[in-house]
Amino acid sequence: MVRAAVLPSIGSPLEVTEIELPEPGPGQVRVRLAAAGVCHSDLSLTNGTMRVPVPAVLGHEGAGTVVSVGEGVTSVAPGDGVVLNWAPSCGDCHPCSLGEVWLCANALTGVGAVYARTAAGTELHPGLNVAAFAEETVVAQNCLLPLPEGIPLTEAALLGCAVLTGYGAVHHSAKVREGETVAVFGAGGVGLATLQSARIAGAARIVAVDVSPAKEELARRAGATDFVVASETTAKDIRRLTGGQGVDVAVECVGRAVTIRTAWESTRRGGRTTVVGIGGKEEQVSFNALEIFHWGRTLSGCVYGNTDPARDLPVLAEHVRAGRLDLGAMVSERIALDGIPAAFDNMLAGKGGRALVVF
């Protein structure tokens, strides 16, 4: 029996309770969690913006130590440090055959499995494959990446989603070039990773945008050269900071129609907007045909940073070891499992950066 945060049904509060976790079967690995990040995607699962089978144990950004392995597991061994990979690629579907592993058609097939039970015998699903909001979890071996050398196990949890997403949005989706100007909308966990990544890319000016003035210090520590409190004049404010032109690149990390539209309007003619935030179906973004032609801007979606975790994790680790990427600077609070609901409330209120569950 281990403690876990269970989502009983869509719209219900999380319940921290004991669950019965079986020993790993063939191809499976049992992991003792060191830490798990509280991501906005977890909140989107609780309110139904993203759908997974319930009841489920949520949490998809985590790192820990291998406890035991099932038959046929050769990639890891007991005692190994690992980072959870919530979206493993199958290698066989059409997107994988094109090298677009972040769009793998089979990445989330594991969410429908029954991986554990409550003390009363209720079947539980593994959230986004890995069920990181628990003291221990059992996952398929392809949901694990080796912990890079020299990276603290607790902070390594952030590499599993926020940092891969933010880094990929800058380097793979928007392809920020040295000397370009960048605006980042939203200074939460992913936004802070995006700001650091823009700095690593050599952006000349980095404008952070958030509804909360209290996030300015966090944003500047991550690499922002300017901070704008979101308002009806945000696009004009950003153009004023960039000589009337607008930024070369805008990265939207919020997932709201009005923010996506503002990010697009904040870029120069021919600029690029990458949307990382996950919005609901009711969030409709509209453009007229003439402005699309006239401005020549690019608007693109970005899934998991368009990353290949196996390829990109070692690159991120090198940035951490060299001091270019500061994982600790993204963490605004360290909490226990019982603190997740309050972390969700803070997220909704626009407070803080990444909350990190430490076991």
Image (cartoon, helix red, strand yellow):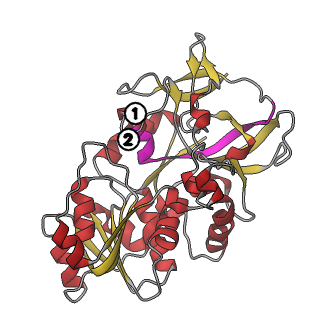
Judge the density around disc 2: few (<14), some (14-19), many (≥20) Cα neighbours within 10 Å: some
Taking depth in this image into account, of 301 and 147 the one nearest to the observer is: 301
Is 219 positioned to the left or the right of 105 in the image? left
Q: Residue at x 62, y 27 (%)?
A: 113
Q: Which residue is mark 1?
A: 46
Tell me: residue 95, above or below residue 357.
below
Residue type indicated by callout 2: Phe
Q: Which residue is mark 2?
A: 344
Is 136 positioned to the left or the right of 164 in the image? right
Q: Which picture quadrant has residue 183?
A: bottom left
* Nearest-to-viewer mark from 1 and 2: 1
Residue type indicated by callout 1: Thr
Across and down, in percent, residue 195 comes to: 42, 71
- In the rendered structure, which segment of residues is drawn in magenta? 26-44
Across and down, in percent, residue 251 comes to: 37, 67
In reply to whether residue 21 is colored magenta, the answer given is no
